[in-house]
Structure formats: structure tokens, C-alpha cells
Image (cartoon, rainbow, N blue to C red):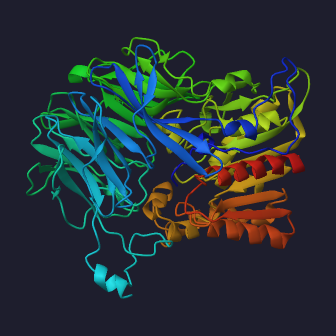
Amino acid sequence: MKSMGYFAFAFCGVLALPLLASAATSAPVFQLGDVQKIVSLHEPQISPDGKRIAVIVSTPDWKTDKNLQEIDLVDTASGARRALTWKRTELSSPRWSADGTRLAFIANDDETKQGQLFVMSMDGGDAIRLTEAKRGVDAFSWSPDGKQIAFITEDEPANEKAIKEHDDAFQVTDNNFLVRAALTPWHLWVVASAGGSSKQLTQGTYSLQTDQQDTPPVPEWSRDSQHIAFTQFPNPYWGPSFQSVITAVDAGGGATRTLVSDGGSTNFSYAPDSDTFAFVRPRNGDQNNGNAVYVGTNGNTRDVTQALARNFDTYAWLPHGKALLLAGAEGTRQVLWEQPLAGAAKPLDLGDVEANAELSVSKTGAVAFVGSTKTHPNELYVMESVSAKPRRLTDVNAFVDGLTLGRTESVQWQGPNGFQEDGVLTYPTGYRSGQKYPLVLVIHGGPEAESTVRFSALPQLLSAAGYLVFQPNYRGSTGLGDAYQHAIFRDTGVGPGNDVMAGLAAVEKLGIVDPDHIGVTGWSYGGYMTTWLTGHYPVWKAAVSGAALTDWVMDYTVSYYQQGDTYYFGGSPWSAKYQDIWREQSPITYAHNVTAPTLIMGDVGDPNVPLVNSYEWYHALRDKGVPVEFYAYPTDTHFPSDIVRTTDVYRRWVGWMTAHL
């Protein structure tokens, strides 16, 4: 299933739970009432000359239950910040023209009620709307000469009139069971950057976007502005997206041609002023490996990241096109590497800063990114070059520095099957040496994700309530290399469960855990691990299962990533060769073993892990007499994205531990 970074969400309110005072200071501890102040930063884009950074700033507003957004312009020398937009909503994708004189972005338009493409001059004046796409704009890019912008939008239904007359039955193919109408493909258009009519360049049953991409693949112009490359998916549904290829079309239209035919290729990008290109693909085409970065030149492609043999979240070209900047996890850190096209990668010295995956590089070699530390939420950083130290430009979350936080550190242990494993341990804010504390496991989703030492709100809330918090990385996690990530193949429950229990044993050896008061919690695949562990080990005194996959066969049948599940097991659950393993590794098979009081939560319209999984788990526990409560949120996401509901999730999460531990 797709990972979900649930600690990153903002939430607020009052936590009506006992909080420990710090033994070392009288500063207040971090709690829900503070989280409403946390500002989020997204999509930093540094100007070509490296002197300014455009970044989306989101501030939660409790009264409206929305995030108030603006695009700010930050001076890289002084850190001075000013707003470029006012009262615009659903902002995304700020992008500079090649000469740095204009900035384009997507925002909701009052007239069309859709996200449209806007351009503003850096000399002043209002932004000009360039598009009026009936289904909105999903991604775009400037041509190098600045004359045109390529964008992606969804087609209108060919049978729109029939649909209005309720002649609207649609064929079930790769859609999830929550889909209520057939999707139409997304295709490529161009529009003059000065304004005018838009022109469609591609058409067909294939699509340039799917219904569940985290971020839409951006179209990429050639250096002479003559053609545009894009990711081509088999259709608009996420299920078969693993067969994506890279295709190109002339800027004036015409037949398309394939540039990269290897299945799973995406995120294509040309090197500066060059025909050399890079793209992302699972290493060696194996979906159970991490994402590798391939480089193509003179008709040949190769994995330039093979020596690191690990997952990379993203990449960006460095000036002159002789090296790449890579972002990914290394153990419990989020780090950056400089990867020459020939030679070994070099990790950048980020000090105590954890780098998010959104990177932007100027023509001068300056790098902009959003980062955090163990004790401070996201801020905007700049590096004058890959050899420089990160310099913090913003202080939007300065208030956190006045709060008492639980100490966070990395822990390592020798795991099963010879793996060296790791995780993150956060101490109670009032921790005293020699005392034992109740422990709560918070297990990350994915499983292709990782827990790192960066500031996370939920562990800090649990810390403030008096708990040790352990976030274990288990096989399938992305921070310990391809061998560890790949080890989840045909071993989705037993192996990861053994990894978690080995980590728990290592933490208990520290002599600080009360062994009679241990809880296990998680969301998404973390919810799967919670249900698996409570069905196999009797040590848990309480559990929180969020958006949990409990039945692999049902999940394969109704979720949006059907083909994605098959990569874990090697084939369909309806094949005699594979059918037994799907049942054997489903937590629902072992629900009769559960004794831990369990809180279940999820979203009613979740297409990722449909809530029927949780309904099945709820009735299994209730019928067995296990204390269980189940709360569903009336939203169509994998985790509530609004402030009020997110607050409620964490209030219940911490409250359940307090009541039962």
C-alpha cells in the first residue's frame, strides 16, 4: 500500500490528558494546544540566480477548519520574507521562468471553480490567469525560451450528455470499489505564457496522470523548446501505473515517440542545456527494490545510483549536468547526496538538519529545501553550494523552541536474518534516570517508508503524556538499503513482526521500560503491523489500529492498487500457486488471538485501505469480547487532511493509551 506520513499533518485543540512537567525546566511541554500554531512549508523553488526562493506557506485556521495559504518570496541573503499572493486557495507548483522574471503557479479560480494556471511578473502587478481548463490543471512546466507553458489536464467525458440523462453505467476495470464514474485520461496541452488559447497535444486511452499519484509527473521540455517529454501511464487508474514509460511529442503536436520503454519509469528530467536525461525507476525493474535514478545519454541508460543500492525519494540536476543531487533516508536520517555521473556518491554535511524530499537547485548551484531537526518543525533552508552548510532562512515555528520536548535518539539492534536494524526512541519529557516507563510503539506506514529522528508531533504528544515512544523500522522500510526493503517479499507479516519484536527487546534491555505496560499503534501499514502483532504476541496492553489492512485478499479486491499487492506475493490470490500465502499473512486469520483493548479509526472514503478492512477487524474483536471502539471520519482521504478531524484522531490516539496503559 502507499505510505502516508501522518506525523506531518497539522492539528490543534486542547488535550484533556495528564501531562508531565519536565524535571529539568519549568518550560511547558508540547501539547495539542500548541500544534495549531505549527506552520507548514511546501515546494520551495529557488530563482535561477539563486537570490530568491518562492515557497508555499500554510497556516492552520481552527475556525474555518482550513489551511490559510500564500506564496512567499524569501531573500536568500537576508531571509526577508514577503507574500506574493493574497486570499488564494489550493496553491501549488510555484515555478520560475528560465530568466527569473516571472513566476507561475496553480490556484483555485473563482470563475471556473478549478485549479488554474496563473503567471505573475516579478516587477509587480496582479497574477494573470492563463487557463480555463474545465477539470483544472494538475502539473505544468515552462519552455526554456519562456514563450510557452505545457500543462496537464483531465479530458471531459465523451458521453457527457448521456451521463446527465443517467445513462451512466461504467465498466469496472482497474478502478477501486469507491469510484462512482469512469475516469477519463489526463493529457498534455500548451499555452502561450503571455496568454491566449490552449492547444491539446496528446490524446488516446493512455494518461499522463492517475487518480492516486501523490504528485503528478511534470512534463519536461527539451533544451531547444521543440519537444516535451512526459510520463505515460496505461490508463487513468493507479493500479497498472507500474507499467509507465517515458514518451515525447513535438511542441507543435503530432505523433508521439517513446524515449524510455522500461516499465515503471517516471520523473523524467533533462540535464541543464543538454540532451542527457535522468529518470526514476525501481532498481532493475523489481518493484520490491527502492527507486533508482537512471541516466541516459547517446542511446544508453544506466543506474548511476547502483553503488548505493537504496531508495531515493527524489533527485535534481546540479549545474553543468555532471552530477545529481539525491534525497532519501539513510538509517534514521533524511539526507542528501551528491552523485557524479561517473564516480561514488558523496553525502552532504547537513549537520543536525533533516532534509525533506522537495529540492530546488539554481543555475548558480544554490540549493533550497525544507528541513527540520529533532526539536524543531519545518523551516526553509538554503545552501550556497553542495559543499556549504545549510543556512536557515525562516523562523515560522520559533515558538516550539520555548517548549519542553522529549529527547529523541536513534537506536540500533541486531535483527533476524542477519539484518542490522534501527528505529527511533523518544523519552518522556519528565524522564528520570533509573525509573521505568510505559512504552508506546508508533509504527510507520508504507511499508516503503521509514521513521527518522526529525521532529514529529505524535511522538511528542505521547512523550508529554509520560510515555517512552518507540518507532521501529522493519523490513520493507527504505532507510537500510535494497536488501532490507526487498526482504518483505512474500514475508509481509512474520518477518516484519520479528523485526519489531527484536527492536522492542533491544529497547527493553536499556532497563527503562515497564514491561507490563506496553502498547502498539500505527496507521496504514502501521495499522496492519498493529493488527498482526496483537494477533501473534500477548504482550500488548492496548492497541490503536488506524486505516489498517487486515485482509490481503479483500484489500486486493477493492483497493486502488490491486497490482501493487501482487508484487509482495508474486501473483494473484486467485491463483492456486499463490492463494495460501495471501490468507496466511492476513491479520484477520489470527484475530481470535487478540486480547489487547483496541481503538480502530479510519476514513469512510479511503481508496487506499478501504474501511471494510476495519469493519471486519471490529466485528471480529467485538464478537470475541475484546474491548474495542471504532470511529470513522466522513472524508475521502487515507488520513483526515483537515485540522479539526486530525485533532480528533490524535486526541483519541493518546487518550486510548492513557486509559489502558
* Horizontal and vertical percent position of residue 262: 26, 49
Left or right: 242 in relation to 28? left
Instruction: Report the residue at 51% width, 52% height from top.
Output: 2
Q: Which residue is drawn at 77% across and 24% down?
A: 404
- Count of all numbered marks drawn on residues in the image: 0
Residue 217 shows in this picture: yes
Residue placed at 78% from the left, 34% from the top? 463
Using the rendered view, name the quadrant where residue 588 is placed: bottom right
The vertical placement of 351 against 639, above or below, is above
Residue 471 in percent (x, y) is at 68, 37
Query: Is 232 drawn above or below residue 309 in the view shown?
Result: below
Q: Is residue 616 above or below residue 316?
A: below
User: Where residue 239 appears, x then y in whole percent?
Assistant: 41, 62
State the image coordinates of residue 464 (x, y, percent, origin top left).
80, 34
Residue 161 to residue 147: above or below: below
Position of 243 with respect to 373 (left or right) is left
Query: Looking at the image, which is closer to me, 60 or 425?
Result: 60
